[in-house]
């Protein structure tokens, strides 16, 4: 018997999903959820807040603390290789008294984060596609077509539907697409990272990239240096999570108690290097910092990295063809990332419904008889993702709100099992093959505090003065949803929700 399946049975779960994913396939999907180019839409505003030095060194600082979170997650994943992952971990680590409440909080945070993550990638993909079409048809200054809000929304919905359709087929299809994804992102990332500065030569000086600090209070309304730096670093906070995807796939992965932790840490390592290199490539390739934000420039000031890439190719070859190719590589990254996030979101909804944690659970936990995937859960996630995008028609801050909700929910879900691991008695923890030993508590403490900081930062207003069109409505949206979830717990769910249900015992008892 596979070691992961054996541990799953010890925890009270029977094997239902097809266990055919290898280490490389799991790593591919995990890496896809993080993606090299994820921060592309945030690069411009991060640069505007505090200049290149804050953006570049902010990545290094965030990476340092992300390793603490990754190590804590890897240790727990090795001990609990289940599809429910974080919420299952929270239930068992918090003990019989607090386990149900801990798993309830964690499950809903994780669900909110992952489902809104679909929206974040759909928005990023639609924006990249919008600029690709613009440059392919003549640029903003040459009569090119710039998609309207309604067309943008159609592209957003179209991407979400494609991901849902692909996730409805056999897991093997998704696994192979994941392999294509990792090569796409690694090779494509190398092409962009190495090729862009070469094309843009001569580039900015190292002193500009690594030491230049410049605020733009007239554009952002932010005059505090500390506040500007915090907002500038949000780019890195947003990019450096998603590695829990390996945990969601553990019931479908061979030797999951070993491959899960390895995939988590390997993904962090790869994205640490590639993400920083991508930011460096963009920053070194800047021609005119002020022109990047001009609404009358070739990309309509809509996507700063696209303007940087366009300036590089047009300046060297007097053509936008190379820029379109590079943007297609970036768009592909968003596509594969959205596909992987949809896969993860569906697995979390499936796991929670398997334990009767959401309304109409019997519907969402149903497995497709032929493809052996939670197809109903896939379409539920896609539908909610589409609803999140509808404000695109009226508001300018949709992306800011979606990524704030996604990050707070997704990363906030990490905090619950990590805190439970921090405070539990060591003798009650059954370690897996990956075990931190005495280093576990200090690592978990640093990880928990860093998560608290990250969630707080994404609740801050991102522009002043605060107006309706620029208001970060994430705190209100999250507040309403979490209040309803907590009221449901207090008034009803605490009486019947006991956390993960042992389906081996249920089956034998039936």
Image (cartoon, rainbow, N blue to C red):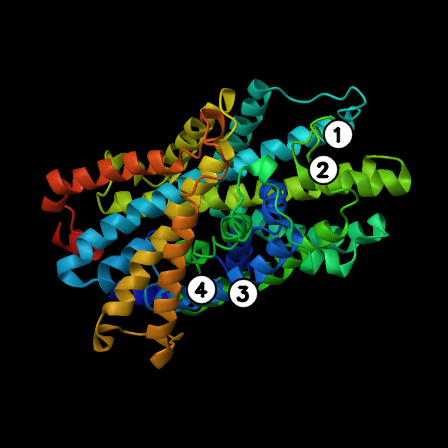
Q: Which residue is mark 3?
A: 266
Q: Which residue is mark 2?
A: 292
Whichever of labels 2 and 3 marks the residue nearer the N terminus, that label is 3
Q: Which residue is mark 1?
A: 297
For the point 61% across and 19% down, the residue is: 148
Whichever of labels 1 and 2 marks the residue nearer the N terminus, that label is 2
Q: Contact (CB < 8 A) between labels 1 and 2?
A: yes
Q: Which mark is residue 434?
A: none
Provide residue 494's location: percent of width, then percent of height.
Answer: 13, 46
* Helix, strand or loop at mark 1: loop
User: Residue 378, can we see it?
Assistant: yes
Residue 189 vertical position relative to residue 465 in the rendered view, above or below = below
Q: Contact (CB < 8 A) between labels 4 and 3?
A: no
CA separation in Å, label 4 and label 2: 35 Å
CA separation in Å, label 4 and label 3: 10 Å
CA separation in Å, label 2 and label 3: 35 Å
Whichever of labels 4 and 3 marks the residue nearer the N terminus, that label is 4
- Which quarter of the figure has residue 187? bottom right
Q: Contact (CB < 8 A) between labels 4 and 1?
A: no
Provide residue 389's location: percent of width, then percent of height.
Answer: 47, 28
* Helix, strand or loop at mark 2: helix
Q: Contact (CB < 8 A) between labels 2 and 3?
A: no
Whichever of labels 4 and 2 marks the residue nearer the N terminus, that label is 4
Q: Which residue is mark 4?
A: 70
């Amino acid at each position: 018997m596979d070691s992961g399946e054996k541990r799953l049975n010890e925890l009270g779960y029977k094997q239902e999903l097809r266990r055919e994913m290898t280490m490389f396939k799991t790593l591919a999907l995990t890496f896809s959820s993080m993606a090299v180019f994820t921060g592309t839409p945030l690069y411009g505003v991060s640069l505007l807040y505090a200049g290149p030095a804050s953006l570049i060194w902010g990545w290094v600082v965030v990476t340092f603390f992300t390793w603490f979170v990754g190590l804590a997650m890897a240790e727990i994943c090795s001990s609990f290789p289940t599809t429910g992952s974080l919420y299952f971990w929270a239930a068992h680590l918090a003990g019989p008294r607090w386990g149900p409440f801990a798993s309830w909080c964690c499950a809903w945070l994780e669900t909110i984060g992952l489902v809104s993550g679909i929206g974040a990638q759909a928005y990023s993909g639609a924006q990249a596609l919008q600029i690709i079409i613009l440059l392919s048809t003549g640029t903003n200054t040459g009569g090119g077509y710039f998609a309207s809000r309604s067309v943008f929304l159609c592209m957003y919905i179209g991407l979400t539907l494609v991901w849902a359709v692909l996730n409805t087929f056999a897991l093997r299809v998704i696994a192979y697409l994941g392999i294509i994804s990792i090569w796409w992102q690694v090779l494509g990332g190398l092409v962009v990272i190495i090729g862009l500065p070469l094309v843009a030569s001569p580039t900015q000086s190292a002193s500009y990239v690594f030491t230049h600090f410049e605020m733009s209070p007239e554009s952002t309304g932010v005059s505090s240096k500390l506040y500007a730096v915090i907002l500038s670093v949000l780019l890195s906070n947003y990019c450096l999570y998603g590695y829990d995807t390996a945990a969601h796939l553990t019931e479908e992965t061979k030797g999951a108690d070993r491959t899960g932790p390895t995939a988590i840490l390997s993904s962090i390592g790869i994205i640490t290097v590639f993400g920083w290199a991508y930011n460096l490539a963009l920053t070194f390739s800047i021609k005119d910092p002020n022109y990047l934000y001009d609404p009358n420039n070739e990309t309509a000031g809509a996507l700063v990295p696209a303007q940087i890439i366009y300036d590089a190719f047009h300046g060297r070859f007097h053509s936008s063809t190379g820029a379109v190719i590079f943007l297609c590589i970036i768009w592909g990254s968003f596509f594969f990332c959205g596909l992987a996030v949809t896969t993860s979101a569906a697995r979390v909804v499936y796991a929670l419904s398997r334990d009767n944690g959401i309304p109409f659970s019997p519907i969402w936990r149903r497995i497709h008889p032929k493809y052996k995937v939670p197809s109903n859960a896939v379409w539920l996630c896609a539908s909610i993702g589409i609803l999140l995008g509808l404000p695109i028609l009226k508001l300018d801050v949709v992306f800011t709100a979606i990524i704030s909700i996604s990050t707070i929910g997704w990363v906030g879900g990490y905090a619950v099992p990590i805190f439970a691991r921090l405070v539990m008695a060591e003798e009650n923890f059954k370690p897996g093959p990956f075990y931190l030993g005495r280093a576990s508590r200090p690592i978990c403490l640093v990880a928990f505090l860093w998560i608290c900081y990250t969630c707080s930062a994404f609740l801050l207003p991102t522009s002043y003065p605060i107006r309706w069109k620029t208001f970060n409505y994430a705190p209100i949206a999250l507040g309403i949803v979490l209040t309803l979830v907590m009221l449901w717990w207090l008034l009803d769910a605490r009486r019947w929700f006991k956390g993960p249900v042992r389906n081996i015992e249920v089956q034998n008892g039936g």
